[in-house]
Image: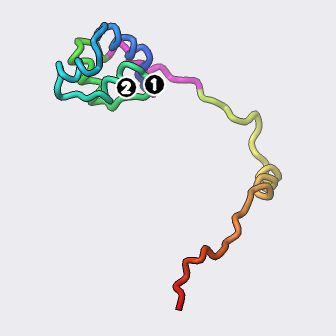
Amino acid sequence: MAEIDWSGFAGDVRAALGDMPINAAVARWPSTNKTLWSRARRGLQPLSAENYLAICRLLGLDPWRRYSDAAKPRRVRRSRPRSLRDIAKNLQNQTVSVTVSRGTAVRP
């Protein structure tokens, strides 16, 4: 699956903006907002494709630089398939909530 290296992109954004505060970036590019610049600079949350491309265009960054279509290795959760015994055991250990009256009935 294709992915963007968000932490690398954030480094590129910080380098391109230099010491410019977020408020100054919003003033320079009025079509943007503080949230967009904050997310782009931190790199912790992915941006939408259109916002990613907009930031790249505004800052003159190559959008393909941080793109990767290398396949990630699949994570295997169990070394063996779950047996019916395991499933039944898990079902027995699940808690069940008791239905109780919450006193919301209409009083006469």
Against 88, residue 102 (above or below) is below
Looking at this view, is 108 or 12 the one in front? 108
Q: Looking at the picture, how far across and down is residue 89, in whole percent? A: 81, 53
Q: Quadrant of residue 61?
A: top left
Q: Residue at x 46, y 28 (%)?
A: 1
In this rendering, position of residue 108 left or right of residue 53: right
Q: For the residues marked 2 and 1, what is the alpha-carbon distance in whole angstroms?
A: 7 Å
x 44%, y 17%: residue: 7
Residue 69 colored in magenta in the image: yes
Image mark for residue 44:
1
Q: Check disc 2 and report the residue beneath it.
A: 39
Where residue 50 appears, as percent x and y from the top left, is 27, 30
Residue 95: image location, x then y, percent: 74, 59
The answer to whether the residues at label 2 and label 1 have Cβ atoms under 8 Å apart is: yes
73 left or right of 35 in image: right
- Tell me the element at label 2: helix
Q: Quadrant of residue 69?
A: top left
**Category of crowding for the residue at label 2, using alpha-carbon neighbours closer than 10 angstroms: few (below 14), some (14–19), many (at least 20):** some
Task: Please rate how many residues cluster around mark 1, counting C-alpha atoms within 10 Å: few if below 14, some from 14 to 19, many from 20.
Answer: few
For the residue marked with disc 1, what is the amino acid?
Answer: Leu
Q: What's the amino acid at mark 2?
A: Arg
- Say whether disc 2 or disc 1 marks the residue closer to the N-terminus: 2
Q: Is residue 17 magenta?
A: no
SS of the residue under disc 1 = loop
Q: Residue sitting at 54 percent across and 87 percent down? A: 107
Task: Give coordinates of residue 71: x percent, y percent.
Answer: 50, 23
Magenta-drawn stretch, dominant element (helix, strand or loop): loop
**Which residues, given as a range, are shown in magenta?**
64-73
